[in-house]
Amino acid sequence: MLAVLLLTWAVPAVAIIRVDIPVCKIYDTAQVVAVGTVLRVNPDNRVIDVQVEETLKGKLDGDRLRVQLAAPAELIKEVAAGGSLVIFTGQDGGKPAAVLHLADTWLLAEPIPNVSPTAWRTVQLHDLKQSFPGRTAGLARVVRQLKAGKPALLDKLELEAFRAGVLELAKLDVANPTFLSAADLNGDKKLDLLIGTAGGVRLFLAAGAGFEDATAAWGLAKAAGSWRALGDVNGDQRVDLLLGGRLWINDGQKLTAAGTPLNLPPASQPLAAELTDVTGDKKPDAVILLADGRLLTFENSGAPDRPWRARPIRALWNGGAAPSAAAFGDWGDDGRPHVMVVRSDGVTRYGLGADAGPPADHERLTGKPVGAHHKAHRDGLKNVLAAAIDVNGDRRLDLFVLADGGGLLLVNRGMGAFLVDPDAGSAVTSPGQQRVPFKLTPATPWTAADMHADGFDDLLVLTADGRLYEVSNPPLPVGDSDP
């Protein structure tokens, strides 16, 4: 292993990304906070009846309330029975006022006097997207966490991603690689490398100070596939492989093809694949997102040699801008897997189940449009490269997106919301006088990998001539932050 430090730079001030008006502040200053469920919607007079499920702070009169949706009137089309409502009441200029979250929208409301049950009339939208841009159901969970004294929503982040520069780790015997994955396949607590090439898959095991080619020894000499997913499919604590629709079982010393290949539609073009539990039985199933928006799901049969049953194909979208990249993970507010899809118009999140609800666009995820951080992005994201990564060691997946004109690091706040670091891309794109020894393109294989077992994912980059680089992302030293 070369492990040569190729690039370092003076450590700049730590970036502090914060929400100016966090939900916890809204909660603390409110006199009453309650969560309810929509019972009935009258579209003619735009009146909504709500059952109060829980009063988290203060006291409401009765267990029902009514909302007249005066403005914006068109929002009534988005309100449905069974939906959630969160209400914060207090004083505004000495007069009673309320902030509502209804149909995934922040609203300002005034009381309607002398009526029963208690009623509020919305008067305008409220600009609190930065506080929480997500769904009303997610906000209901946030305020319940606040009542329990266990706030989980990230409102402030001290971050200097990839602060330690670039290391050249190795020169591998591969040419024009197509994908790169890192996982501990042999259980030695070191990350091994699975690499796709036009001639087949290559496996390099971490050994001593470098990597050794173990492709043949591990039974992969004839293995091939243009896409892959890694995970423990049989519960033996070993990382198995789904490669091009074929399952390979890991016994700790080799990988063995098992069962019959998954039956994908003809001419399928997988955009992303994952082994993750979508049925709730604690066994990872296979989910494959095709470039045309079709989602394929194959249920884990419980035994590698038994066929995995295909679920009905779901269309997550039809038409529109072509996707550039996608990543599966816990991106939502309900603990279930979702997929983030990157297009020219930003990042969109899709749920995997039929009951997942509508997709969440870039502004729903971050509170701002995709072009808010880099001028070049106002015309759309071009030449996109994306990776799921835990950049701050909180065990939440973040999304690192590179495009012409700058990078966007979407840091997972929890509950389906994200902070944005617009400067993280500088570590791998050589602005100004800095230089990195590679040029990233949409075809460059890269992956997140916790190379130092510190909980913070680093980035691995593999060039066309087989050079493996680490973009190091160590934890921020204690006390190393701006006041």
Image (cartoon, rainbow, N blue to C red):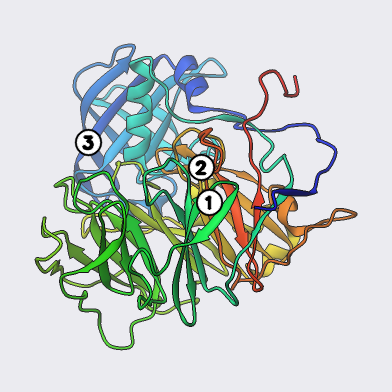
Q: CA distance from mark 1 to mark 3?
A: 40 Å
Q: Residue at x 63, y 53 (%)?
A: 408
* Front position among marks 1 and 2: 1
Residue 305 in the image: state x and y as whole percent: 12, 66
Q: Which quarter of the picture shows residue 174?
A: bottom right
Horizontal side, residue 244 vs residue 437: left or right:
left
Q: Nearer the viewer, residue 380 or 66?
A: 380
Residue situated furthest top in the rendering = 58
Query: What's the residue type where badge 3 is placed?
Result: Thr
Q: CA distance from mark 1 to mark 2?
A: 8 Å
Please count the marks in the image: 3
* Residue under numbered circle 1: 448
Classify mark 1: residues with Cα within 10 Å, few (<14), some (14-19) or many (20+).
Answer: many
Q: Is residue 474 visible?
A: yes
Query: What's the residue type where badge 2 is placed?
Result: Asp
* Front position among marks 3 and 2: 2
* Residue under numbered circle 3: 37
* Residue under numbered circle 2: 390
- Pointers 1 and 3 in contact (C-beta within 8 Å): no
Q: Earlier in the sequence, mark 1 or mark 2?
A: 2
Classify mark 2: residues with Cα within 10 Å, few (<14), some (14-19) or many (20+).
Answer: many
Which element type, helix, strand or loop, lies under badge 3?
strand
Which element type, helix, strand or loop, lies under badge 1?
strand
Residue situated furthest right in the rendering = 433
